Amino acid sequence: VTVSVLYCGKAQARPRAAYASSVTSACESATPEAQTPRSFLKTRAPPSCDRRRDRKPRASQLKSPRPGTMAFLRTAVAMLALLAAVAMAKQQQHHGEKEAAAGSNMPSLGEGATSFLLVAIPAIGFAFGMYWWQLAAEVSIDPAKMGGRNSFLTTEVMRNVQTISMRVSDGATAFLFAEYKYMFVFIAGFGSLLYFMLGTSMASPTSGEKPVDAPWVNAFLSLVAFVMGAGTSVVAGWIGMRIAVFCNSRTAVRATEGADEGDSGAGFAAAFEMAFRGGITMGFCLTCLGIFSLFATVKLCQGYFGTSQEMAPQLYECVAAFGLG
């Protein structure tokens, strides 16, 4: 979160108007021969500097960054780091003698501070991802709004873009539901096998293995962790597919920016920006979803095992099934 916040802050620090001013300066210093397009080019001739100087900047160039949002995210990250440092120092001071007696010098967070961080950090990361999704959603594919924006985005073209986007979305949804049918069958079959194999093995421990008080309860908690992991995978796949389909058509629309002026670089930059916003949204949302689901699985198993160090090995043996899911 910290690296992304700092990167996005630097990326928004230089407005696009600076690029327009640099182009204008270059045009003013250019010779008349350099300003005249070559007549023998068969492709669309680049605009003259007079035309580029006189045209109005696009809305995307005039859009100012949102310093308030970035300042809030930086403040939130700094507060979390400060809270972690204070909690570690307080925990080390409070349990210093106990840790020294146990032969451990590693500071640890308290239960409350750990739970707070494992909930607050994914929440902030998810909010950060949704912020970039909101920016991506500002690009519309509605023919009434985008038709006639430039010579490429005619009303007919935008109708086709909207139709293709809807068909891609319907196809992606059909694919996901077909995939989920097979996944649910596998989850049910493998989960049942996992439950009976773990219960049987823990009920009859071999020599050298520590017996378990309630082997079938441990097996059931492992099954719950497995289902939680599988459910997280299903939700992550759904979110990832929705974001990818959502940004697909909008990336194509943004790629036409600057086409009328012969500025192909503006189209590349706008398309990359849209794709990058979709990637940020997907990455942060899926990562934070995984962290929060794993934390919820640990807390669910702690409801039975408790927080004692003696039961920690059994607790995390059950939680390990989350990775199988």
Image (cartoon, rainbow, N blue to C red):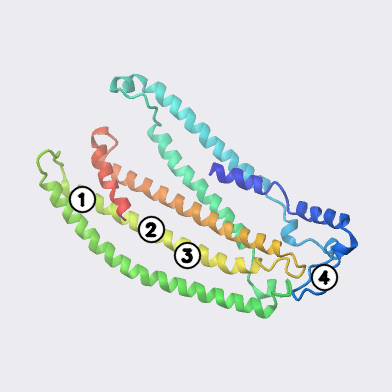
The Cα–Cα distance between marks 3 and 4, rounded to whole angstroms, is: 45 Å
Q: Amino acid at mark 4?
A: Arg
Element carrying mark 3: helix
Element carrying mark 1: helix
Q: Residues within 10 Å of mark 3 (few under 14, many from 20)?
A: some
Tell me if label 3 and label 1 are in contact, CB under 8 Å. no
Of the two numbered discs 3 and 4 on the same chain, state the one appearing first in sequence. 4
Of the two numbered discs 4 and 2 on the same chain, state the one appearing first in sequence. 4
- The picture places residue 256, in percent across and down from the top left corner, at 68, 68
Question: Which residue is located at x 54 percent, y 54 percent?
Answer: 280
The Cα–Cα distance between marks 2 and 1, rounded to whole angstroms, is: 21 Å
Classify residue 235 as left or right of residue 271. Answer: left
| Location of residue 137 (image quadrant) | bottom right
Q: Amino acid at mark 3?
A: Met
Return the residue at label 4.
38
Count of numbered labels shown in the rendering: 4
Return the residue at label 2.
233
Q: Amino acid at mark 2?
A: Ser
The Cα–Cα distance between marks 3 and 1, rounded to whole angstroms, is: 33 Å
- The picture places residue 181, in percent across and down from the top left corner, at 33, 70
| Location of residue 310 (image quadrant) | top left
- The picture places residue 112, in percent across and down from the top left corner, at 40, 35
Return the residue at label 3.
241
Q: Residues within 10 Å of mark 4 (few under 14, many from 20)?
A: few
Return the residue at label 1.
219
Question: Which residue is located at x 33 percent, y 24 percent?
Answer: 104
Q: Residue furthest bottom?
A: 156
